[in-house]
Image: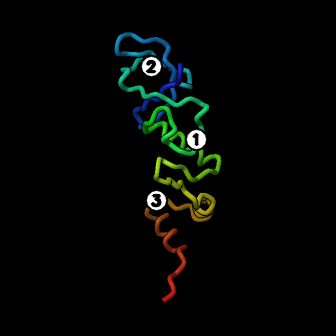
Amino acid sequence: MLPLWLQLPNVDWELVKIITTYGAESVISLPDGKVLKVKEDNLVPAIPDILNGVDDLMELSYLNVPADLFILQYRYNQDMIYTKAGPVLVAVNRFKKFLSLVMTILKPTSVRQLKVVMFMQLPTQPS
């Protein structure tokens, strides 16, 4: 059976496996070994491993938020920052190395401070 996604109370998505099902409820296993009883409505189908890294989200067998986020994260980790969603091109953080340098050197404490730092790094426009 394919793994499923479960949205945790902290809003993260976690891949889980069903142990047993009773009516509209399932007993699932989390990767850390915890066992929970959840409503089946809270489970979302995951994609098969063979589709990891697919370059067009429309090729996924299940089109849902956790699957899309997983593919984007997977491709980002492989330095494949461009992903299609049908006719739409999704670019994920093409300034990855620049941002990590800024975060290392300046250690901004807030998103607002980071935006100010990034704005200051923009080249000035010729007049």
**7 vs 84: above or below:** above
Mark 1 or 3, nearer chain start: 1
Cα separation between marks 2 and 3? 36 Å
Q: Residue at x 51, y 36 (%)?
A: 60
Image quadrant where residue 23 sits: top left
Rendering coords of residue 88 (x, y %): 46, 53
Q: Residue at x 51, y 49 (%)?
A: 84
- Applied colour scheme: rainbow
Count the numbered circles shown.
3
Q: Are marks 2 and 3 in contact (CB under 8 Å)?
A: no
Q: Residue at x 59, y 37 (%)?
A: 52
Task: Select label 1 or label 3 by which is in front.
Answer: 1
Circle 2 residues within 10 Å: few <14, some 14–19, many ≥20: few
Task: Select label 2 or label 3 by which is in front.
Answer: 2
Rendering coords of residue 22 (x, y %): 38, 10
Rendering coords of residue 70 (x, y %): 53, 39
Q: Residue at x 56, y 61 (%)?
A: 107
Rendering coords of residue 101 (x, y %): 63, 62
Task: Select label 1 or label 2 by which is in front.
Answer: 1
Residue lying furthest bottom: 127
Cα separation between marks 1 and 2? 31 Å
Q: Tag on residue 36?
A: 2
For residue 3, side relative to residue 100 (left or right): left
* Residue on which disc 3 sits: 110
Q: Are marks 1 and 3 in contact (CB under 8 Å)?
A: no
Q: Amino acid at mark 3?
A: Ser
Cα separation between marks 1 and 3? 34 Å
Mark 2 or 3, nearer chain start: 2
Circle 1 sits in a helix, a strand or a loop, which is it?
Answer: loop
* Residue on which disc 1 sits: 54
Q: Tag on residue 79?
A: none
